[in-house]
Image (cartoon, grey):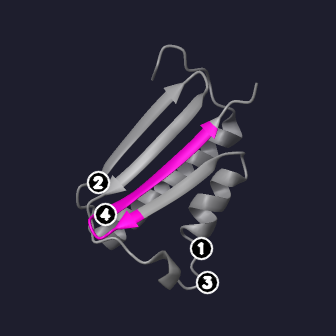
Amino acid sequence: MASDAGALPGRVARALVLAATQAIANAVQHAGAAGLQVTVQARAAGIRVRIADAGGGFDPAAIPEDRLGIRGSIVARTAAVGGRARVQTTASGTVVTLEWGRRA
């Protein structure tokens, strides 16, 4: 952790941990944990968590509406605490980035 990083509000920490846990579970289940990397960058302005794998990627449009792993457990959970989640996927892997910033 960077020396200027302050404590996160509990609800933010919980949301980011749960969203990251879902992203890791998805990488294990769907990519066999190939190339799995998790990085956390904490600064005074906020935090960024990046979960990446080297799996075959997927087509986000092909995910059935009743599947809530990405939409509910990652994107909506992060948005509910004022953060942002991005999912980028290609044939060479998937990267989920969770970001939350402090408001001035």
Q: On the rendered structure, is 7 left or right of 103?
A: left
Q: How far apart, in angstroms, are the residues tagged by discs 4 and 1?
A: 20 Å
Q: Position of residue 102 (x, y in %)?
A: 69, 30
User: Disc 4 versus disc 2: distance between alpha carbons?
Assistant: 10 Å
Query: Disc 2 marks which residue?
Result: 36
Quarter that holds the C terminus:
top right
Residue at 45% in and 55% down: 96
Q: CB under 8 Å between callouts 3 and 1?
A: no
Prevailing SS of the magenta stretch: strand
Q: Is residue 10 left or right of residue 20?
A: right
* Helix, strand or loop status at disc 2: loop
Alpha carbon of mark 3 to alpha carbon of mark 1: how far? 7 Å
For discs 3 and 4, the disc positioned in front in the rendered view: 4
Disc 1 packing (10 Å; few <14; some 14–19; many ≥20): few
The residue beneath circle 4 is 93
Q: Mark 2 is on which residue type?
A: Leu
Question: Which residues are the magenta region?
Answer: 89-100
Within 10 angstroms of label 4, few (less than 14), some, or many (20 or more) residues?
A: some
Tag 2: Cα neighbours inside 10 Å, few (<14), some, or many (≥20)? some
Nearest to N terminus: mark 2 or mark 1: 2
N-terminal of the pair, mark 4 or mark 1, is 1
Q: Which residue position holds label 3?
A: 65
Mark 1 highlights which residue? 68
Q: Which mark is residue 80?
A: none
The residue lying at 61 percent from left, 83 percent from top is: 65
Q: Splitting the image into 4 quarters, where does residue 71 fall? A: bottom right
46 relative position to 53: left or right: right
Task: Quarter of the image for the N terminus: give it.
Answer: top left
Q: Nearer the viewer, mark 4 or mark 2?
A: 4
